[in-house]
Image (tube, helix red, strand yellow):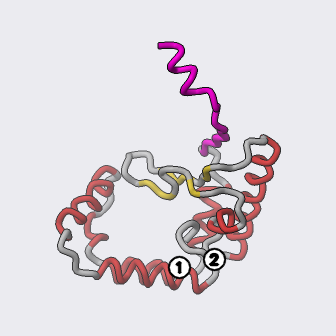
């Protein structure tokens, strides 16, 4: 819900031309024992002050979401998408199932959650403050985050070639 649609909060950074795209591997990744959530963009301003302003705007947006929550239509749309994708019959069902099970095994999560999409969606729908609570817990109150601000070095390739 943070990234994927034009109504998503982070998409606004792209829409306004602040960045050209999301960074590689953005979003939630449960494929390793230590799961991660990455928020990042490419082609931001290389001026440090402007990067800090963007970071401040991002933090303000997260604070707003932690207090006001997401737009109800955005939540309903995301849940509907999950439900329809979870019930769609696909010819690659077996390999997709295997792909979805591996992170659950890695993180010792009950595999039955994959098969009961209706119960999982109902649980999400019944938790009124779920998303604001998650934003507070994992973004705003989490002291274990890593902050990386990078800008490209335009002579990197030349320097590598010269060193060989």
Q: x%, y% of residue 57?
A: 77, 59
Where is residue 15 drawn, in percent x and y? 67, 68
User: Which is the main secondary structure of the residues drawn in magenta?
Assistant: loop
Query: Dot 2 corresponds to which residue?
Result: 70
Q: Residue at x 58, y 71 (%)?
A: 131
Indicate the position of residue 3 as horizontal and vertical percent values. 56, 66
Quarter of the figure with residue 97: bottom left
Give x and y (percent) for residue 49. Answer: 82, 44
Which span is picked out in magenta? 145-164
Query: Pointer 2: residues within 10 angstroms few (<14), some, or many (20+)?
Result: some
Residue drawn 38% across the image and 77% down it: 120
Q: Residues within 10 Å of mark 1 (few under 14, many from 20)?
A: few
Count of numbered circles in the view:
2
Q: Residue 52 lies in magenta, yes or no?
A: no
Query: Which element is circle 2 on?
Result: loop
Image: 131 above or below 51: below
* 26 or 62, nearer to the observer: 26
Q: With respect to residue 14, does 79 lie above or below?
A: below
117 or 61, which is in the foreground? 61
36 lies left or right of 52: left
Tell me the residue at 22%/60% (across/down): 98
Image side of residue 35 versus residue 158, left or right: left
- Side of 160 where 7 appears, left or right: right
Q: Nearer the viewer, mark 2 or mark 1?
A: 2
- Which residue does the image show at 70% across and 62% down from the upper left? 17
Q: Is residue 156 magenta?
A: yes
Quarter of the image for the N terminus: give it. Answer: bottom right
- How far apart, in angstroms, are the residues tagged by discs 2 and 1? 13 Å
- Say which residue label 1 marks: 127
The image shows residue 41, relative to residue 71, as above or below, that is: above
């Amino acid at each position: 819900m943070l990234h994927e649609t034009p109504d998503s909060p982070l998409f606004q950074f792209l829409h306004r031309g602040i960045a050209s795209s999301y960074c590689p591997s953005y979003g939630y990744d449960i494929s390793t024992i230590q799961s991660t959530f990455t928020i990042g963009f490419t082609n931001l301003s290389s001026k440090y002050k402007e990067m800090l302003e963007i970071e401040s705007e991002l933090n303000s947006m997260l604070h707003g979401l932690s207090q006001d929550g997401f737009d109800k239509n955005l939540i309903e749309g995301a849940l509907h998408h999950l439900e329809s994708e979870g019930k769609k019959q696909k010819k690659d069902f077996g390999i997709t199932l295997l792909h979805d099970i591996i992170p659950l095994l890695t993180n010792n999560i009950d595999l039955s959650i994959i098969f009961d999409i209706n119960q999982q969606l109902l649980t999400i729908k019944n938790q009124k403050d779920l998303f604001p609570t998650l934003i507070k817990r994992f973004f705003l109150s989490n002291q274990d985050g890593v902050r990386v601000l990078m800008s490209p070095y335009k002579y990197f390739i030349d320097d590598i070639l010269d060193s060989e």
